[in-house]
Amino acid sequence: EAQVTQNPRYLITVTGKKLTVTCSQNMNHEYMSWYRQDPGLGLRQIYYSMNVEVTDKGDVPEGYKVSRKEKRNFPLILESPSPNQTSLYFCASSSHRGKRGNQPQHFGDGTRLSIL
Amino acid sequence: AQTVTQSQPEMSVQEAETVTLSCTYDTSESNYYLFWYKQPPSRQMILVIRQEAYKQQNATENRFSVNFQKAAKSFSLKISDSQLGDTAMYFCAFMHSGGSNYKLTFGKGTLLTVNP
């Protein structure tokens, strides 16, 4: 089954304690991206990756890091989490084949982070 | 930067009736893609329907259809024969047709409740 898998689904932690949210896809997609969803703001892009070792900032990258060492994995790293990073996070992936709009972005099930 | 506006934070409809969700966007591009995503309480992001700006014909997927008015930069979603399972947050989203980032720019969402 084609899927994007995020872990953990839920996490409560404290300010300053480094954490990593993992994202893995089994569709051999080149493109992967991270979004955060906040009430009243919709989803906003944090970082994206066009392929292995190619990453770039999205609209709200401050306080986050990513890496793309393997095609299937795109972890999101919060090195020193703060309460304003409390949010719902989504990983997404899609293929470069064909027209971009015809390649649906597959979303993970989301990770609810609470930073106390 | 592109913006997507959903002016209805909440809407409700009776089961079996028709409801229309509004979306406007701002862009200077001539080609782009527009999407409606559904987020039920399970918080999954589910693609409902997509539209390429070059295509004149409005997209339709079963009970879901769009009214795409390119000159007015409007992209509304019509849900016919509403069902209880349609209860969800609905997001309108925009994607560039070019460039290296397949970013989706989302509106703030419309919470739709279908009443029995």
Image: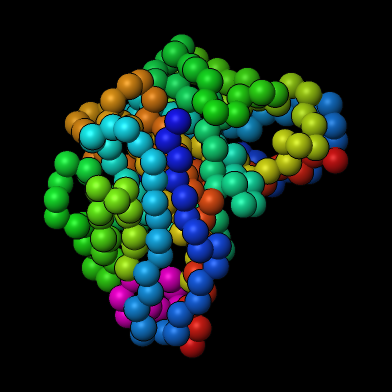
Magenta region, residue range: B79-86
The quadrant in which the N terminus of chain B is found is top left
Tell whether A53 sits left or right of A100. right
Whether residue B37 is visible to the viewer of this picture, yes or no, is no
Residue B35 inside the magenta-drawn segment: no
Whether residue B26 is visible to the viewer of this picture, yes or no, is yes
Q: Nearer the viewer, residue A88 or B90?
A: B90
Which residue is most to the left?
Answer: B56
Q: Nearer the viewer, residue A89 or B103?
A: B103
Residue at 29 percent across and 66 percent down: it is: B64
Residue B83 inside the magenta-drawn segment: yes
Residue at 38 percent across and 74 percent down: it is: B19
Q: Position of residue A109 (x, y in %)?
A: 53, 48
Residue at 45 percent across and 40 percent down: it is: B3
Residue at 36 percent across and 85 percent down: it is: B16
Q: Nearer the viewer, residue B3 or A96?
A: B3
Q: Name the quadrant containing residue A50.
A: top left
Up/down of B93 relative to B48, above or below: above
Q: Position of residue B13 (x, y in %)?
A: 45, 80
Q: Position of residue A110 (x, y in %)?
A: 57, 46
